[in-house]
Image (tube, helix red, strand yellow):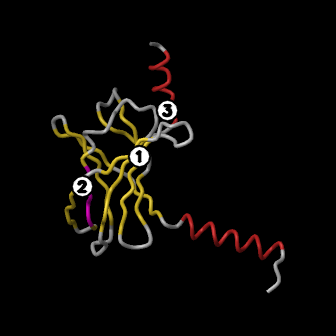
Amino acid sequence: MFLTKSNMIISFCLLTSFISANYEFLVPRFSKEGEKYYVHLMIDDDELKLKECKISSGYHKNNTYYSKSVSFKTEHHRMGRELIIDITDIPKNLPYAYDLVVYTDEWFNFKSYEFAFSDKEDNFILYDRDYEADFKSDSDSN
């Protein structure tokens, strides 16, 4: 097979799809019981063995990266398995969004959409540009 421009483009597209296909993104739900905060993730595969769950925030480039292994428990439902992750101990004042990665024994992992702590809601919320604007305006007034 000769390497042509079109073959290289196709090969590059296949390579990037294989690299980026190792995460399945999940939408987190949040709950609060007393002073404890929880994230709930639904996984539709009951047979999958879960190894570890990590929460992370920040960037490596400017030395603001935060990463921590967190404990989780599972509950089985008709829709699949629900992971309940206790995130009470993480710092709530970081200016970056958090995400959770659930590592499995298989070749792919699960990753949550980004979330952040909202003082207005007194709970965690899905991260978007509105939260970023609120956080910057609150911190600029000090």
> Which residue is at a point 37% across and 29% down the rendered structure image?
93
Q: Give residue 78's position: percent from left, percent from top.
A: 23, 69
Disc 2 from disc 3: Cα separation: 29 Å
Does residue 108 appear left or right of residue 90 in this picture?
right
Identify the residue under disc 2. Answer: 72
**Magenta-colored span:** 81-85
Q: Give residue 30's position: percent from left, percent from top.
A: 29, 45
Crowding at mark 3 (Cα within 10 Å: few <14, some 14-19, many 20+) = few
Disc 2 from disc 1: Cα separation: 15 Å
Q: Are marks 1 and 3 in contact (CB under 8 Å)?
A: no
Name the quarter where the C terminus is drawn.
top left
> Which residue is at a point 34% across and 27% down the rendered structure image?
119
Does residue 13 appear left or right of residue 42 in this picture?
right
Identify the residue under disc 3. Answer: 130
Q: Is residue 49 above or below residue 70?
A: below
Location of residue 77 by image quarter: bottom left
Q: Give residue 89's position: percent from left, percent from top.
A: 26, 39
Q: Earlier in the sequence, mark 2 or mark 1?
A: 1
Identify the residue under disc 1. Answer: 56
Q: Is residue 51 above or below residue 10?
A: above
The amino acid sitting under disc 1 is Ser
